[in-house]
Image: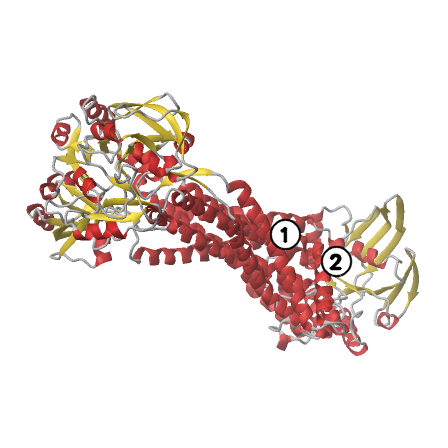
Amino acid sequence: MSSIFSQIFTVIMMNIRSLPKRLWMSFAATLAISVVVAVLLSFLSMSNGFKKTLESAGSDKTAIVTRSGSKSELNSVLSNDVVNIITTAPGIAKNADGKPIYSAELYVVVDGIKRTTQTKANLPMRGIAKAGVDLRGNVKIIEGRMFEPGRNEIIVGTAILREFSGFDLGTTVKFGKSEWTVVGIFSTGGSAFESELWADARTLQSQFRRGNSFQTIRVLLEEPGNIEGMLEAVKQDPRLILDVQTEIDYFKEQGEALNGMVNLGWILSIVMSLGALAGALNTMYTSVADREREIATLRAIGFSNISAFFGTLTESLILSVIGGVVGTLAAYIFMDGLTTSTLGGNFTQVVFSFHMSADLFKSGIILALAIGLIGGFFPALRAARLPVVLAFRGGA
Amino acid sequence: MSDLYLVYKNLTRKKLRFFLTFFAIFIAFLMFGALTAFDSALNAGVELSADNRLISVNKINFTQPLPISYVRKVQTVEGIEAVAQFNWFGGYYKEPRQQVMTFAVDPATLLAVYGDDIAIDEERYDNWQKNQQGILVGKAVADLYGWKVGDRIPLHSNIFSKQDGSSSWAFDIEGIYTAKYPQADTNSVYIHYKYFNETQSFGGNFIGWMGIKTLDPKLNEQVIKAIDDMFANTPFETETVPEKAFNQSFIAQLGNIGLILSSVVFASFFIILVIVGFSMALAIRERTNEIGVMKTLGFSSLRIFKMVLMESFMLIFLGGIAGLFTATYFLGFLNNAPQFPLPDLILSNDIILKAVAIMVFLGLITGIIPAVNALRLNIITALSRR
Amino acid sequence: MTDKILYDLRGVSKEFVKGKEKITIFDNLNMSIKEGEFLAIMGPSGSGKTTLLNLLGGVDKPTSGEIWFNGSRVDNLSESQLAKWRAGNIGFIFQFYNLMPMLNAERNVELPLLLTNLSSKQRKERVAAAMELVGLSDRAKHMTSEMSGGQQQRVAIARAIVSDPKLILCDEPTGDLDRKTADEILSMLQLLNRDFGKTILMVTHDPSAATYAKRTLHLDKGEFVEKELTT
């Protein structure tokens, strides 16, 4: 008999050619797999997008200083004295005048209305000075102008404009008793900062009765990622009860809030996969049963049982790959780019979009293949072990 | 022997096929039960909110403070039974990851407003009131960390620090409260406002928000107006809303969780619909000859129609009930697992009823076409298909 | 065998329309079966044997003409009425047994009794009697798929007689059996006819099977050629 490969190939082609007979069952299994893959990718793209938004806001050239144990900008409080002390620590970049480059900022929460649901949302308002804008490097005012120090003016990030109502250029917004005018719209290349409102730090301090205190300090590092000098200074000085992190690490921690979502997504998808697996097995067993006589005849002629095994297995894998691709496409079409917002680590809304990537596509296909492999393995085994005598038995 | 017996024998004819379709249905209903219970627990805070309770926060945002003098002032408003005060402490136990929902309250007024939810021994509550460093702990938290009445525990705050520079406060556990009804919250702990305020380093006499109990839900609207009017145009304006609305907007901030869960559940049901539907159709088609024989023997087409429908119903119900049963066990296991911040997950009668309705619907959809085909099957055609 | 006519076909015609062609199976056929007869019908393929059987079994309707059974017309009954009529009057035996594979022998035999109002106890008694008659009492609980052809056909016979029908219709009952087993089955049919007075109509292509019957009719292109045989 010809080589094992040509045998396998022949059997595979026969299986595929006879697929139309089992069209509906095969269709059912493929559809089931595509649904499972679509669900998995939806969850993954959601967490992916969230992480991306947060991580793109972080830079390793910047360090964030917060009060020890506060875990988020919102909870932290830093007095002016502390600001002055820590900014003399080694490792901080200096400007042309030899002064340390840093930005002392405030972070309060105000109410906004979500466009889609018309429900209340917590929005972050950051008190920031020119130093902070410069520090971030990628801030562009795309409409209007920057706020003027000392005035009740705010600029809003593009994400805010997109997801929440009432912040169009020129409008006056009321937070409690104080009124603010939206004088500009800024973008930061898609990072989490676009979900914020920015105002002059001093103005915010007086309006929110913060005296002379801040909440976080961002410093530019001499050497990217090197916060050793600052950590040492904190250790040595008992007045400094602070946490120092690179901005990247800080946002990474914030992003971990969604780890639960990813895990949930995987758990749900795996459970659903079991259901789809049942469908795949059902289809493949039916396929083998349908072609019992055929397979046995081939074996009687001299085809090896390995060819029968691979023939069936390949059929299953092909169906599952089709399902995986369809599911991925569906997730991509419906989910990619979908923007939404959720509660971030700061108790404030973070706007993000679902983001499909090549990595995710891989995950989807792997899941599909896994189902196809398991779903085809046992039926393939049965096909390989069919007694040849089935080819000769007359009638059913 | 009966029609039901015949249906059962037909259904279990091919053991493997029966098991696989049964399993797919089982999975779908397991997910339905678990996810719906989860969704309901998430909304429990909303559903179980008392009609006659309000929350009054700073108008800018609930994270902004209110002066403590507001508590006395609000008490003078007509229609109010009691006013409680809260400060969010931002507590954690030993490490920042182990967050503890800690509220600084006035013990004299806490039960007056929330007595319907909190079940606590009178004597213990009294002890707690008398000890300024006392803490009232919810059962869920106590179980999680193995705390007992009489323990002295340290709690850190990730917002506040003490005047001595540290951020660790020591408390005596004076009582452990339980839920007065299922799904009521026992994940919070309560400390004395006085102790907290006098030892924290920020100074100033501020509270976070007020919880208000009205004499009658019908008075809610006028009370809300009275309170917010009282503080309009002051540096600290208030926004007062019914407790239900407040809880609802909180959950809404998380995003449309309900939508996500429903979509996943819908997707699961869609999968089994497709799998089981085609499997049923195939199974009936394979029995064309037998159906012909049954009709020849004298079974009416209608009777056979009913039997096919019974078969799909039986399959769906067997898998569905098994799935719900397992969901109950699974939920029970989750409820007892540590680190679970939600109220108890229960498979309520409501959820079970919904599940049964879905089973009926699915049974119908997967069975109707094969049943109609069997109904219409012509004997001669059927028998000639050997 | 009495002189009472059990089954009477009067001027029965049966036509099929296939595309544009009209195929006539029977044209103005007349036939009667007396109570207690054992009638064999033989003929080449295409002669209309199967169609005749279908008509007699109430599974098909004539294009024109009348069919009278036991004094009442049956050709104008509705489908559900025919089903009821079949259940009460006809027992069927097929070439390939047509037993239900998921039921054991006695449950297969019990099947037609589900169409009656008999109690469970009464059904069990009837089934036991039928099983004994065909000599399979000791295999009552066996799955029919595990039985030989002859045994399966005996189960089928038990099923055919369990509700005490007036007429037993057999379609090539020995077509799938070897000579010896065939003879056993045919003897059993003879027994039913002779000792229990069952009217039997058997369609067969096997001449030696026909010898077991009392009368043989030959069908050719939709018409009868009679050949009487006495036993």
- The type of residue carrying mark 2 is Leu
Q: Are marks 2 and 1 on the same chain?
A: no
Indicate the position of residue A289 as horizontal and vertical percent values. 67, 64
Disc 2: host chain: B
Indicate the position of residue B89 as horizontal and vertical percent values. 19, 44
Answer few, some or many: residues within 10 Å of disc 1's Cα (few below 14, many 20 plus, some between 14 and 19). Answer: many
Instruction: Give the SS element for disc 1.
Output: helix
> In front: C146, or B76?
B76
Asked if A288 appears above or below B132 in the picture, the reply is below
Is residue A164 among the parts visible in the rendering?
no
Is residue A328 among the parts visible in the rendering?
yes
Classify residue A87 by image quadrant: top left
Q: Quadrant of the N terminus of chain A?
A: bottom right
Farthest residue toward the left? B130
> In front: B49, or B325?
B49
| Horizontal side of residue B125 vs A133, given as left or right | left
| Horizontal side of residue C201 vs A166, given as left or right | right
**Count of all numbered marks drawn on residues in the image:** 2
Protein image colouring: secondary structure
> In front: A311, or A21?
A311
Q: Which mark is residue B383?
A: 2
Asked if A70 appears above or below C146 in the picture, the reply is above
| Horizontal side of residue A364 vs B371, given as left or right | left
| Horizontal side of residue C89 vs A27, given as left or right | right
- The type of residue carrying mark 1 is Phe
Residue located at (44% from left, 51% from top): A265
Disc 1: host chain: A
Classify residue A155 by image quadrant: top left
Indicate the position of residue A170 as horizontal and vertical percent values. 37, 20
Which residue is under mark 1?
A27
Instruction: Give the SS element for disc 2.
Output: helix
Q: Quadrant of the C terminus of chain A?
A: bottom right
